[in-house]
Image: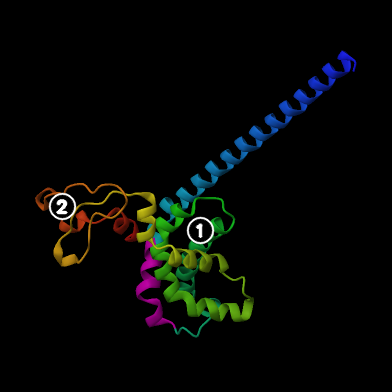
Amino acid sequence: MDVAIVTNAVVAAVSVITVAVSVFFALRQMRLSQSANHTLVAIELLTRDRMSDAFLDSQQFVLTELRASCSPELRVSELPPDARKHVNRIALYYNGLGQMLAFNVVDPALLIGTGGFRAREAWAVLEPYILAERAARGESYLANFEHLVVLATERPWSVAVRKLGLRRFDGYPAALGMVGGAGGADPVPSVPSAGLSGERGVGSAGSASQSS
């Protein structure tokens, strides 16, 4: 076989491989960049919006006042304007988090670990209003909110704590009925209560996340 032909074939093969490798790394870099952007969006939602006075007021209303002031037979769109405003703010917030989960744009542990507890609480109150609205509008109404709650129920924070290897204190006040030392890594010694602002400060990292 002619040496020139062999040489040209080798050069062509090397060129194709080089192009393929370049495309692979370019696509990988693009995916990493997109993932970073999505994570930033998730963090923005989890921090700025959820800590705003408007969100906290709506959360308080939904969790403590909605059922007493509005019949659960009502659709969301049938609620009085003020109540509907609070419900939509909470429901659309968690629906947005669920949408990010549905499209796999952010690590589920980030969203479920920080928002799953409150999402389950909100869904427990809002479910009849949402289902009544679905009866008129279709199954897609706030489907991502439900998706988030289902995943948060199937993967509770106590399980996430173990998977993430979060550190926990060696012991808690006996009155709390909690067991320390869970979370993968070796437990650290108990911190004297005198050095804390209160005994509840000795709680696990998981408990702190769930209280948010």
Q: In the image, is residue 198 above or below residue 79?
A: above
In 3D space, how far apart are the residues under numbered discs 1 and 2 (Cα atoms)? 33 Å
* Residue at left offset 42%, top offset 75%: 125
Tell me the element at label 2: loop
Name the residue at the front extreme.
1
Kindly report the secondary structure that dominates the magenta region of the rendered protein: helix
Q: What residue does disc 2 label?
A: 197
Taking depth in this image into account, of 5 and 15 the one nearest to the observer is 5
Asked whether the beta carbons under mark 1 and mark 2 sit within 8 Å of each other, the answer is: no
Q: Quadrant of the N terminus?
A: top right
Judge left or right: residue 11 versus residue 180: right
| Residue 179 placement (x, y as % from top left) | 22, 61
* Residue at left offset 51%, top offset 48%: 41
Q: Earlier in the sequence, mark 1 or mark 2?
A: 1
- Residue 195 on the magenta span: no
Quarter of the image where one finds residue 70: bottom left
Which kind of residue does numbered mark 1 sit on? Leu
- Residue 63 on the magenta span: yes
Give the number of the disc on residue 97: 1
* Residue at left offset 38%, top offset 59%: 159
How dense is the environment of label 2, judged by Cα within 10 Å: few (below 14), some, or many (20 and up)? few
Q: In the image, is residue 28 above or below residue 189?
A: above
Quarter of the image where one finds residue 99: bottom right
Judge left or right: residue 194 versus residue 208: left
The image's colouring method is rainbow
Tell me the element at label 1: helix
> Which segment did they paint magenta?
56-70
Quarter of the image where one finds residue 153: bottom left
Taking depth in this image into account, of 134 and 192 the one nearest to the observer is 192
Q: Quadrant of the C terminus?
A: bottom left
Which kind of residue does numbered mark 2 sit on? Ser
